[in-house]
Amino acid sequence: MPLEANNISFRYRTDHWILRHLNLAILPGEIVGLTGPSGCGKTTLARLLAGYARPEAGRVLLDGQALPTSGYCPVQLVSQHPEQAVNPRWLLRDTLHEGYVPDEALLLELGIKNEWLKRWPNELSAGELQRFCVARALGPGTRFLLADEMTTMLDAVTQAQIWQVVLKAAGERRIGILVTSHDEQLIKRISHKSINLAPCL
Amino acid sequence: MNSVKTLSLSCRNPNRRRLNRRQRTLVVVALAAAYLLLLLGGGLLLGEEGLSTNLTRRNMPPSLSYPLGTDWLGRDMLARTVQGLSLSFAVGLAAAGTSAFIALVLGLTSALGGKRLDTVITWLVDLFLAVPHLVLIILIAFVFGGGITGVIAGVTFTHWPALTRLLRAEVLQLRSAEFVLVSRRLGRSRWWVATRHLLPHLKPQFLVGLILLFPHAILHEAAVTFLGFGLSPHRPAIGVILSESMHYLSAGSWWLAFFPGLALLTMVRAFDVLGDNLRLLFNPRSAQE
Amino acid sequence: MKHQEAITPLLEVSDLSISFTQYTGGLRQKTIRAIVNLSVNVKPGEVLAIVGASGSGKSLLAHAIIGILPGNASVAGKMVYAGEPLTPARQAALRGREIALVPQSVNFLNPLMRVGAQVRSSALNGNDAAVQREIFTRYHLAAGTEQLFPFQLSGGMARRVLVATAAAGGAQLIIADEPTPGLHPAIVRETLAHLRELSTAGRAVMLITHDIIAALETADRIAVFYAGATVETAPVTDFRSEGELLRHPYSKALWQALPQNGFRPVPGCQPSLDDLSCGCLFAPRCPMASPHCLTAEPALRSLRGGEAKCHHAA
């Protein structure tokens, strides 16, 4: 059932180790906060858990098995910069429907207006784009959500709006969440437990 | 906003009546394209005009009835030049088109097909780039038996490397773009990602690269034919026309080389203008001005 | 707390409106209004923080003041610096000298020029090298830093270099455009402290950010932006407990949405740039809205030591 990082270690080429012998587990429906100084591997860990990169040593396991390499991955990542996570040459409607077709209720809750679907990414602001990324990541196959500084670049109202929806969906569908953030107040407010990645090497 | 002073920080305040920059670019593109199509069509329409000899009107300088003069066999230089350009265009089209297609396939394969394939293709690119164009074209044209096939083959196989490199670099960069990685995690297959995400991004580069290949192709064809390795002398390609006119320059028949040369220049320039303006239109940074 | 009312502002922006002509995806052009009737001022020796959502026009204001808007922008309104109107010619003369920008990242520096050289090139009077060395020491940058290129700087060093470049020129007005984008709290605090120091030295600092907590720690006054206009200016002390001292409903919503407060959002979204509706742009989401709000745009009026752009503010 859980998403686990089993004794993983990671580094870029032959640089110093960013993560070394790390163990972590997230249970369904659990919200885990991840804090730590810059450059300590919070984003790297999130990307390893979502299958965007492979650890040098150790394994990432979902229900005791390796993450699937094809098909819809049950672990979805939403990162800090929505402008990079959408294809600038696609209409937003196509971006939204890339993984699955979200239902109207979710779009309404996230505040995604119908007229935005016909627009290009460069016409919308970061806050508006991030709503699309979140909707895209909450497909029926999603069991774990990794929020890597998901709302760091957004203003307080948009941040509260997005988290309200995500926490509700997580509660209803027992989605496990890993929240990375510098904002300790946010972590304190929403997570069940929090992990600090210091000391880093 | 109505009754306030305007501190216009920009000097570009589009007037209703003037066309905006994008419209102007499109006009230029349309004009260049029209000129080129005219040449292509003109050549087909003229048929046998440029080949018919009439010994009563030999070596006539430019006049009202023969704007570009006639040559030593009495052939009308205007018809011959237009036909020559048209033929060069056709050869250029075949060569540039095939070349660009090869570049697309190899560029994609190289960037997506794994390390070993990439190394092989890159090595091939470097090899072809290292050999001087003209020498290689002549060799290949010779191998293919000369004539039109030889020229087209020669130009095709020497012009794919540069565009391949460009497209490969573009794909390599795109491959690690966040939205591409997300797409795979959402369950999309590699083929889907290549056709829906990567190819559309390559379209502008590909189109501009293709159009800018034309001038090269045409000039090389002219050069090769000029040297005697390309098309047969009775087909009025520009290279042939220029080559033969060399004999008559010292006799004073300057129009035999001047006008065809000028015509070749304008055609090549039209392609350049077309390509550059298309690039301007596609480039998102300059596209908004 | 200084008494700001008696001091004349160094920079005064009145009824600024900025619009862009953009292609609609074909050949026609449409006009997009990005900033509408914006008024704000900064006094010497204070830090004014401009807080707003992305897309509210904060960076545009900075670029408009410095005079680096793109070619398809048209500007209306009045900008006055040190008592004289800020014309494009004057902007070009003052840029980097009296008005300096601390940009968002080192991407705004010349990537081919060593960092020391860039700071020296902006030094105003006296011995360039001496000024640069003095500034680097003041910002705790090691001796070898001046030889590095921008891409070689780590996050914290980059921040310090950017502030140093702006401070070296002796600028009287410093505009910091999102100086701490998503950075670690320690670096954020350090950068903000440097900006605070600059204001203590008598310069005017305009801090543009979406991070309201950072703004509250550094600024004397906060200007809240919404949909291309200032909706409230308030002293920093008004931002506390439930936000009852705040004047505009959006400021209150912003305050109450913070995780340490209610974490309660108001529904809806900031109107997009080509929403040319008249009336108050916050009205569709406002709990206090009346029919009057939808038709008449409120004026920015003084209220209890601050300003508010609301018909119902009290």
Image (tube, coloured by chain):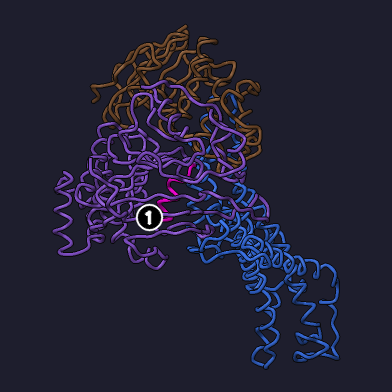
Chain colours: A brown, B blue, C purple
Q: Is residue B105 visible?
A: no
Instruction: Depth check: give the residue in front, A54 or C102.
Output: C102
Q: x, y (%) of residue B196?
A: 63, 36
Q: x, y (%) of residue B119?
A: 47, 41
**Which residue lies most toward the bottom here?**
B252
Instruction: Read off the magenta span.
Output: C56-65
Q: Is residue C125 visible?
A: yes
Instruction: Depth check: give the residue in front, A146 or C220.
Output: C220
Quarter occupied by the C terminus of chain C: top left
Q: x, y (%) of residue B38?
A: 77, 68
* Residue ID for mark 1: C12
In the figure, residue C284 lies in which quadrant?
A: top right
Query: Which residue is located at x 63 percent, y 28 percent?
Result: A97
| Image side of residue C158 versus residue B267, left or right | left
Q: x, y (%) of residue C21?
A: 59, 55
Tell me which chain the residue with mark 1 is part of. Answer: C
Q: Main secondary structure of the magenta part?
A: helix
Residue A13, relative to residue C157: is it above or below? above
Query: Is residue B38 highlighted in magenta?
Result: no
Query: Which residue is located at x 38 percent, y 17 percent?
Result: A189
